[in-house]
Structures are given as C-alpha cells and as structure tokens.
Amino acid sequence: MPRGNTASSQTTKATLGLRELVLEGELAPGGRVPEVELAERLGVSRTPLRIALATLAHEGLLEPLAGGGFVVRAFTHDDVVDAIELRGVLEGTAARLAAERLGSRRELVPLEEAVAELDPVVDRTGPEALVRFVALNERFHEALVALAKSPVVARSIANVVALPFASPNALLSSHALLPRSHEILVVAQHQHRALLEAIADGHGTRAEEIAREHARLARRNLDLVLADRDALAAVRGAPLLRSVAGG
Amino acid sequence: MPRGNTASSQTTKATLGLRELVLEGELAPGGRVPEVELAERLGVSRTPLRIALATLAHEGLLEPLAGGGFVVRAFTHDDVVDAIELRGVLEGTAARLAAERLGSRRELVPLEEAVAELDPVVDRTGPEALVRFVALNERFHEALVALAKSPVVARSIANVVALPFASPNALLSSHALLPRSHEILVVAQHQHRALLEAIADGHGTRAEEIAREHARLARRNLDLVLADRDALAAVRGAPLLRSVAGG
DNA sequence: CAGGCGTGTATTGCATACAACGGCCCCGGC
DNA sequence: GCCGGGGCCGTTGTATGCAATACACGCCTG
C-alpha cells in the first residue's frame, strides 16, 4: 500500500473533490449522492470515495440515508445563525482559556503580529486589501485557538468551522461587493485588538465576551450577504442554503 | 446491497465492536491498530472495518497515523478536564438558548418530569438508586439539549460527549464506591432544579452559568475517581488515560 | 378504475484480490 | 566492528466483482 502518501492518496483526492462539489452546489442539496457516477467523475474508485462520503457525513455536509446512501444536507437560515453563534461560544472559550493559561508574554507574539499587520490593511481599501485581510484574519484566529492550549477545544472549533458560512472569514469573500464593508473591517480589527488586550491582561471573562461579539459581527454580515444575490454567490457553500429565494 | 439494514450492517457492527474494544482497553493506547487481526476478531471484512476506523478517528478515539493506519489515542488528565469544561460550555449554551427560545411552558414538561422523578431517587441511597439516577440524569440532559432547538449545538455536544469521561454520567457509574457520593447527587439535583427554574423564567445567562457549574461538578468527581483504583476501573474508557500511575 | 402484488433494475454494501510502500534483517564491504 | 545497501515481509490502500435489497413500474384482479 502507498503508506506515506497521505497527501496524495486517493482518499484525500476523493474527500477534497467531493467537498468541493458539495460546497459548489454541483450536487443538488437534498438529493441522493450517486456513488458510481461520482467515482468516475472524481477519478477514484468507489472504495476511497466511500471513505470520503463517511468523512463528509461526519463533517455534517452529508446526511446518511436510512435506506442506505447519502443525501446532500441543506442548511436553513437558523442553522447558519446557530453555527455562527456556536463558533462565537467556542472561540470565546478559547479566548478565556488563553487568558487563564497565558504563561509568558512571548506566547502572545503570533497574535500581536497578526494584529499589527492587520492595522495597515484596514487603513487601505480595495480587493487586494481584502484578500490580505482574510489571510491575516485566519492567522489571528489560528493563533487564538493555539493560545487556548486545548486540543479538545481546537477540535470542536474545527468541527463547527467546517460548516458552511461558519468560518471566521466565510462571509468576507463577498465584502468587496457590499456597502459598509470597510466599516465592518474596522470594527473587526478593533475587536481583535481588544481581544489581545484582554488576554494579555488575563481578563478571561472579558476576552470570552469579546470573542462572542466578534463572531456576531459575522451574523450581521450574514443578513447583508443574504440580501445581495451577487454577494451570496461569492460565498463558499451558498448553494447549500435552503430556499435561497431572494438571492 | 443490503440497503435498509443500517442497524444490522457490518459497518455498524464493526463500529460498535471497535468502540467497545478501544474503550475497554483491549487495544493498547498509543499502539497501532492492526486491521486484519481486528477484522477477524470482529467478524467483519476489512472494508466495513475501515469505515469504522474512520468513524472512531472522527470521534477522537483514534488518531490517523502519518504513514498510514491508526493509533489508539491516549488521553491526558488535561484532556479530560478540558472535555468536561467544554461540555459545560456547550450545555451552558444549550441552556441559554433553551431560555431564550422557550415558546410555551408545555415545552418544559420533559425537563420537569425528569427533575420530579429525580427527587425521590436522591432521597434514597444504594446502588439501585444510583442506576435510576443515571437513567434520569441522561433524560434530563437530553431534554435540555432538545430545548435548545439547535441541531448544530446538539451535534457539537454529541461530539464532545463521545470522548471518555466527558459524558454527563460517565463518572457516576463509580459513585457507589466513593465517599460523599450522596452529597454530590444532592448538589447535582439542586442544580437541575435551578437550571429548570432559570430556563422557565427566561434567564438565559443564569441558566448558562448553572449548566457550566453543573459540569464542573463532574470535574470535582474526576479527582475523586482518579484517586480510587477500583472506582476508576468502573469508568468506561479508563484504560485510555495516560499514565494512570496511582490507580 | 383503483389498489395491490410481483418482477426487474439500479444502487449500495461487502468481501476479496492485488499492488505499493515502509521497515527490518541479513549480508557484504570498508 | 561498523556502516551501508539490497531484498524480503508485513501492512495498508485501492480496485473490482458479487450479492442483496429497495424502489419503481407494470400487470393483474377486484
């Protein structure tokens, strides 16, 4: 067996490809997933594909059917709202743990760097600044989770973030198309700084609340994105939303 | 294909059997999981077994090895503490949502029934009372999660509870062997009632804090259980604890 | 005409065979 | 005696073939 090629294995290929197909809406939400057709479409055998199906089912993107097989899960507006709120709760916990478990100030360096590098990006505007913001935003959130020093919490966050629209920058991709986009980034960066400060000062409860509110910023964005057809189309996983009537 | 036999499928058989073997410590923690040996031991083929391996890996009981294959995960004391704390956070969120989303008082009936039936159980003592307590305790927690009306939160809780020692009544099994066991149950039931009251009154924040503290009761139990060799042996998943030196 | 039953088909679940890769041991050379 | 290389073996990853079931369609019957 190809033992060390976790990166290039057929299972990985199937998982990534399947996830892509699901998130891009190439498989109709609510519809049954045809194994054989998918296997040849992804260029893999049915065996690794079935592993991928199980993986996606555990991620919550697919739902095991009683009679066998899987259906693409459809997400309601409430599901997305709950997922965002839940991410806030979990990142809030991560922030609190980070504050409570902070050893030396040197541990804060990654977080500080992300915040510092975000400053000039927020001052600027335009699509390229947004791309940079997304990258740094991701670094910030990764650094935050790392500071919690809790694999259990990290895993739980990873599970939630895998859901559509729940990722910290899931809704940022379409910001360029939205009004008030820049203001939102300014607020977000303000919260980043406040979060860093709270953690540095060992204020766990404050850090937790800031992180929750930070996530709720995404919830506000959600309504904006849902109101704009073009913006919604730019969001990964948009086709999985049930009854995307207006746009 | 045997389409509708989700309950009796080979995959289910493999998953349940494998989980049992892991939790009972029949597979050495940190050790590689031998596929072929396991397949014949469980009486299934390697194909459904591999699905089961992936499932257990997603649950966090197994860890995918870089070179291929899986190892049985070993849990540190910190892991268990974090898992319990995390359950508190998630059940706290469920409690808050339950309070915020409570429609009519009739929705509270399952929770009220569980609390009411727990009262006489707490008054009594002995092993059979403990068994009854465990059953009702489970009903209470299930009712709580249901009241949150959030599949996303429910799924997240289910993921955490799958970890050893993290379940609401994981540590209760050994209570009969512990001192002060009865007092702990009294406190737990007091918290149940307070939680119910807070939800009924729509006090989300209070409900959240009570649920967190309720989970921390389990954390206190953890230290007691870890100090008692016999009590620890009665806990499901105990062999997965790393360096269980004292007992 | 409607409802139920039987058959056909498509699809999945499972088992097995094969292949490839990493580790280990032995042997040879330095 | 030690280090390096090559071959063998064990293990896992992958592919394919087979079998079983559920759904659908059509026919028959009341």
Image: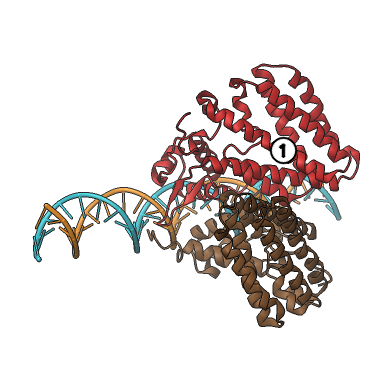
Chain colours: A brown, B red, C cyan, D orange
Residue at left 38%, top 58%? A3
Residue at left 81%, top 45%? B205
Residue B247's x, y, as percent? 48, 28
Residue B153 visible to the viewer = yes
Residue A24's x, y, as percent? 66, 70
Q: Secondary structure at mark 1?
A: helix
A113 horizontally vs B106: left or right: left
In the figure, residue A30 lies in which quadrant? bottom right
Q: Which residue is mark 1?
A: B213
Query: In front here: A19 or B168?
Result: B168
> Considering only vertical position in the picture, is A94 above or below B83?
below
> Considering only vertical position in the picture, is B135 above or below A216?
above
Residue at left 69%, top 16%? B125
Residue B134's x, y, as percent? 68, 28
Query: Label 1 sits on what residue type?
Result: Glu
Query: In front here: A164 or A206?
Result: A206
Query: In front here: A125 or A177?
Result: A125
In the figure, residue A237 lies in which quadrant? bottom right
Residue A61 visible to the viewer = no
